Image (spheres, helix red, strand yellow):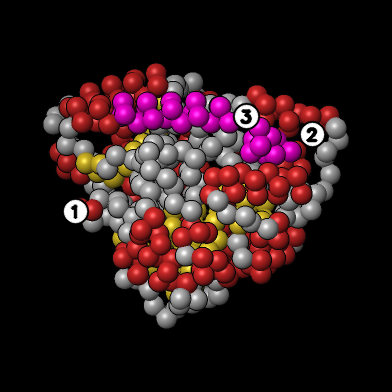
Amino acid sequence: MIELSSRVNTMISSPTLKLLQIKKQLQTQGKVILDFGAGEPDFSTPENIKEAGTAAIRNNFTKYTPTSGIAELKKAIRDSYQAEQAYAAKDSQIVVSPGSKYGLFLLLQAIVDPGDEVIVPLPFWVSYPEMVKFCGGRVVFADHLQPDRLFELTAASYISRCSAQTKAVIVNSPSNPTGKIMNSEELGKLIDYFYKKNILIIIDDCYRKIIYTSGEYPSPMNLVPAASEHVAVISSLSKTYAMTGWRIGYTIAPEKLAAAMTKIQEHSTSNPCSISQKAAVEALSGDQSAVQAMVEEYRRRRDYFARRVDEIGHITYALPDGAFYFFADFSHYIHIKKFRDDNQLAMDILEKLNVILVPGSAFGAPNHLRISYATSMEDIQEGLRRLEEYLRNDR
Ligand code: GLU
């Protein structure tokens, strides 16, 4: 048997994607599963976007494209980013990739050397630590689990972990799994502190357009104008436009970094899918009413969740400002039911209720569960009914 590389041996599988597989397996056994697991919109890709993809196939737009993305898509990205975030990106700063996940992978590969530290938020999205480790980097956590400021994204939590080895910090706002947003003041403080130390600030804003607060979403490129060479934004079309399978994300980065990412993409995937790029042009520049409708529906579900979780009781959470996850502390029930941890609780819920939830340990937060509400209201009502009955049992 061929020895695997030590790099890959230290990597763990993606817990969120593994749950998608488990769901498929259970469905083939004829089970009806209520899926609150992997964050994937239950909506179909809007018709106008599907039509643009179909037209691309019909028009034979099915060949290689420029590695960092077609000019038409870069223009759509520039225009929409300018309109929403008041920042004029240059084409040479934009790298379109097969999903924002791959964009982050390229970016970390381009900057992290063995021994470098990258500060990631805690709780974290499952792929951050694995990607950093894969580059030979060391993961350092900015702790947002303090009970008195639950999940609040603060500059101080990052600044306190800065060292001479820090190469980059990752800010995920709105956060997966907590849905919290870092406000302008905190983000400004963070950028100001780290850029002066020649450290890259990576903003993963995949859920930027799925927010429920009335306040503006801060524009990281404009908060500290002098920091422009030290800020990179990674965005996704997957969640906003229900396009997870099309695999389109983009990064806006300093030119030198964008060029380095492009070089890695040249030698790994050549280019993002040509058909998906045409669909992405329509997504960003076409009618946005489907997005508004989806966000309104997510908000309705979030509010319903909060009400029902309060009724169930003994579950601690902070109301999400964005994204489509509830991240809640189930310590009380883990204790009452004499479980070892959140993994055991999630497994028991899956076996007994056919409901998929993600254990908080996957995000570095034991005793929590992540519950995605990117699933239909009927499933949410039924899932919460089952959960309530289950939790009230031997309480
Ligand atoms: N980002 C989504 C999640 O957290 C999809 C799966 C993944 O890429 O991790 O569930």
The amino acid sitting under disc 1 is Asp
Q: Residues within 10 Å of mark 1 (few under 14, many from 20)?
A: few
Q: Residue at 31% x, 65% y: name it.
A: 156
The answer to whether the residue labelled 2 contacts the one labelled 1, judged by CB atoms less than 8 Å apart, is no
Residue 144 place in picture, x, y as percent: 30, 56
Q: Residue at 22% x, 23% y: name it.
A: 389
Q: Is residue 6 left or right of residue 33?
A: right
Q: Badge 3 is on which residue? A: 287
Who is closer to the viewer here, 228 or 40? 228
Picture layout, residue 52 above or below residue 259: above
Q: Is residue 115 visible?
A: yes
Residue 312 place in picture, x, y as percent: 20, 28
The answer to whether the residue labelled 3 contacts the one labelled 2, judged by CB atoms less than 8 Å apart, is no
Q: Is residue 236 left or right of residue 96?
A: left
Q: Magenta segment: does it hold 294?
A: yes
Q: Badge 2 is on which residue? A: 56
Residue 191 place in picture, x, y as percent: 44, 66
Quadrant of the rendering where the C terminus is positioned: top left
